[in-house]
Image (tube, helix red, strand yellow):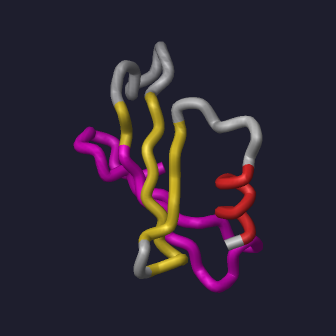
């Protein structure tokens, strides 16, 4: 929740990225980012899922790309 509050209270938004926990699980977050030029995601909005464990922040969350594409994880 501390990290989510930091994102929500940020004066400077992260341009092209949004993310939030699911209503029923603080350990699963969904978000979107805008693909940058010269990348495989160029001109696309990419939907992803972050899954946190009880060991966060010592263990990073798992990231899974949910948008259809040949690459499905990050």
Q: Residue at x 69, y 75 (%)?
A: 56
Q: Is residue 54 left or right of residue 25?
A: right
Q: Which residues are magenta?
A: 47-74
The one of 31 and 63 positioned closer to us in this rendering: 31
Q: Position of residue 11 (x, y in %)?
A: 76, 40
Q: Position of residue 14 (x, y in %)?
A: 64, 37
Q: Quadrant of residue 58?
A: bottom right
Q: Please, is residue 36 above or below residue 56 in the view?
A: above
Where, quadrant-wise, is the N terminus in this rendering? Answer: bottom right
Any magenta on residue 52?
yes
Q: Is residue 43 left or right of residue 29?
A: left
Q: Please, is residue 64 above or below residue 14 in the view?
A: below
- Circle count: 0
Q: Is residue 45 left or right of residue 74?
A: left
Q: Residue at x 45, y 30 (%)?
A: 34
Q: Position of residue 9 (x, y in %)?
A: 72, 53
Q: Please, is residue 14 above or below residue 64 in the view?
A: above
Q: Residue furthest left?
A: 68
Q: Residue at x 66, y 37 (%)?
A: 13
Any magenta on residue 62?
yes
Q: Position of residue 28 (x, y in %)?
A: 47, 71
């Amino acid at each position: 929740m501390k990290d989510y509050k930091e994102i929500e209270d940020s004066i400077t938004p992260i341009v092209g990225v949004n993310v939030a926990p699911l209503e029923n699980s603080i350990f699963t977050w969904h978000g979107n980012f805008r693909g940058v030029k010269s990348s495989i995601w160029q001109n696309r909005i990419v939907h992803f899922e972050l899954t946190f464990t009880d060991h966060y922040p010592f263990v990073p969350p798992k990231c899974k790309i949910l948008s259809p594409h040949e690459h499905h994880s990050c």
